Amino acid sequence: MNENMKRISGKQLVCVLLTTRLGALVVDSLAFAPVEELNASFVLYMVAQNLLVFVLLLPLMLLHKAAPEENVLQVLRRTAGTPVAALVAVALIGYFLLTSSAYNAQFVTFVANSVEPNLPIELISLLILVTGIVVACSGIEAIGRTSTVLVVVIWLSFALLLVLTWKLADFHRLLPFEPDLSQWKRYVVVGAARNASLVMLFVLLPNIKGPIFKPVAAYTGFSLLLSTVMGLLMIAVFGRFLLLLIYPVYTLSALRDDLFFFRLDIVHTAIWLTGLIMQTGVAILCVALAVREFFKKVSTKVAATVTGVALYGVSSVIDYGQHQQLVQVHLSYLAIGFYVLGFGVSLLALVLHYVRKGKGSCQPEQSPSPSQPPSC
């Protein structure tokens, strides 16, 4: 079956979004939090960040409602021409390659620095990308079904981590509640752009059954809940020492030595790895579908394999093994791509769709009576 004809439900979409995002949440909750906001004011930061993501996705949601059988590239190709759509496709492919390589570099750096320094970095990266190719080749329906199971397991893992580390918290560290908005907007704007997996809706709109307003709203709510709870817990446990930690969730999970959960840090690593593999797989699938939009004779599996090889090449060139700070800078600059593709181009496609629809609606209908006026 053609990949463009396969569909997932709204609930499966929520699970896919959460699974691809949860891996990043274990490091992103405080990645761009203002250092002055290491108290309960952090909640306001997370609320603003998630609301901004939801607002930015409104053009995609409206476009899906207006043209449910087309993605953004197809709408642009129909309304603005193939050259414009091809240019956007190239930008989209570059965005997915760079973001996926950066996320891959984050995890590889984490493994090399905190888990097992003797593991070969190239092999870890290769295994992640090979698994991502397999995920992409399995198709969107298989990804939807798998995500439904994984999201339950991952949420239970986070709940286990929360329960077992709750007693370590000193909630006096959450005070005072005094938000400082001097640099707040910059942190919210950059932090919101870390939802790179949401750009996949750019390509996958026709593969979703029914309206996507409620699924995106549900994803926003669950993401806000998890990131806020985990962020407040880490602030309550570590306080100002949190500024010195590169992987706070991993450090938090390593503090427990329970009889039945002796290595809770392994749970953290598994969550991150699972989310990264799913994010990589969905990114490869999106690139493959974008390529097939212009090269119909290329199968999805071939395009996914070539994309995976290209992604491995980009990941090999971008060596962050000894430069963890560069990963954050790299992802910060990629925030531009999120706003251009996730909002700007989507809004343009929505406007062009309605402009073309408006022009087409005033064409004269075929009628046996030549005196009958055109219907508008």
Image (cartoon, helix red, strand yellow):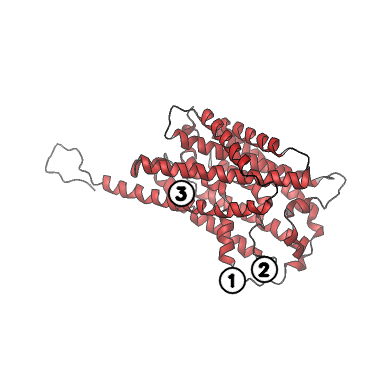
Question: Mark 1: which secondary structure?
Answer: loop
Q: x, y (%) of residue 172?
A: 77, 68
The residues tagged by marks 3 and 1 sit, at their Cα atoms, a distance apart of 31 Å
Residue at 51 percent of width and 54 percent of height: 336
- Name the residue type under label 3: Leu
The span from disc 2 to disc 1 (Cα, nearest Å) is 10 Å
What is the C-alpha distance between the residues marked 2 and 3?
A: 34 Å
Query: Can residue 53 be seen by looking at this rendering?
Result: yes
Q: What element carries label 2?
A: helix
- Number of numbered discs overlaid on the protein picture: 3
Asked if the residue under mark 1 is in contact with the one under mark 2, i.e. CB atoms within 8 Å, the reply is yes
Residue 338, label in figure: none
* 92 shown above or below 28: above
Would you place residue 49 above or below residue 274 in this image?
Answer: below
The mark closer to the camera, 2 or 3, is 2
Give the labeled residue for mark 2: 36
Vertical placement of 86 versus 254: above or below?
above
- Disc 1 marks which residue? 182
Please give left or right for residue 17 compared with residue 253 in the image: left
> Looking at the image, is mark 2 or mark 1 earlier in the sequence?
2
Residue 44: horizontal and vertical position, in percent? Answer: 61, 65
Q: Residue beneath label 3, please? A: 60
| Residue 37 left/right relative to 368 | right
Can you give x and y, in whole percent of width and height, for residue 359 in the image? Answer: 27, 47
Residue drawn where x is 59% and y is 71% of the image: 182
Q: Of label 2 and label 3, which has the lower sequence position?
A: 2
Name the front one of labels 3 and 1.
1
Q: 317 and 177: which one is in front?
A: 317
Query: What residue is rendered at 20% in x and 43% in y?
Result: 364
What type is the residue that disc 1 sits on?
Ser
Count neighbours of disc 1 (C-alpha within 10 A) and say few if under 14, some if 14 to 19, many if 20 or more.
Answer: few
